[in-house]
Image: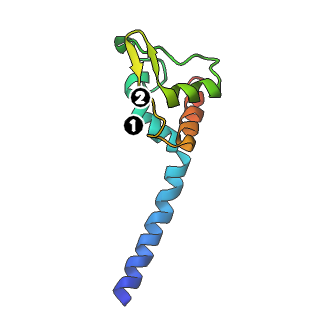
Amino acid sequence: MKFNLVTAAASLIAISMATPVFAQGSGATIYKAKCQMCHLADGSGNKGMKVPAFAAGASNASLIAATKNGVSTGAAKMPAYAGKLTDGDISDVVAYIKTLKK
């Protein structure tokens, strides 16, 4: 019984410490895992892959649509993330993208 209580307490502490970190940086985390390879850390676009930089004035709606539906511009083909990421995840990524070039 004592072991189970200690294990449960340790688990709750670990979860409570990890959750705020994930919640605060989910857009950044997803961007780094799924987007950065092609769009680079600063959003400038991988010229070798013919991926353009994010448009400075791109609206949230256009970035969300591109992320959900994918983009095909010549040699660069971005996959669609509808069904792979939630709407909340996509919104978090778009919010993070908006912080890249201030």
Kind of element beneath mark 1: helix
Residue 16 percent coordinates (x, y): 50, 64
**Residue 18 against residue 10 in the figure, above or below:** above
Q: What residue is at 39 percent from the left and 11 percent from the top?
A: 50
| Amino acid type shown at disc 2 | Gln
Q: Marks 1 and 2, how far apart in space?
A: 7 Å
For this rendering, which residue is in front, 41 or 83? 83
Residue 33 percent coordinates (x, y): 39, 37
Residue 56 relative to residue 4: left or right: right
* Pointer 2 residue: 36
Of the 4 image quadrants, the one containing the N terminus is bottom left
**In this view, which residue lies farthest toward the bottom?**
1
Residue 22 percent coordinates (x, y): 49, 51
| Amino acid type shown at disc 1 | Ala
Q: What residue is at 50 percent from the left and 27 percent from the top?
A: 69
Label 1: few (<14), some or many (≥20) within 10 Å? few
**Residue 21 against residue 54 in the figure, above or below:** below
**Residue 64 against residue 87 in the figure, above or below:** above
Q: Which mark is residue 51?
A: none
How is the rendered protein coloured? rainbow
Q: Which mark is residue 33?
A: 1
Q: Are marks 1 and 2 in contact (CB under 8 Å)?
A: yes
Kind of element beneath mark 2: helix
For this rendering, which residue is in front, 62 or 24? 62
Of the 4 image quadrants, the one containing the C terminus is top right
For this rendering, which residue is in front, 74 or 40? 74
Q: What residue is at 56 percent from the left and 39 percent from the top?
A: 92
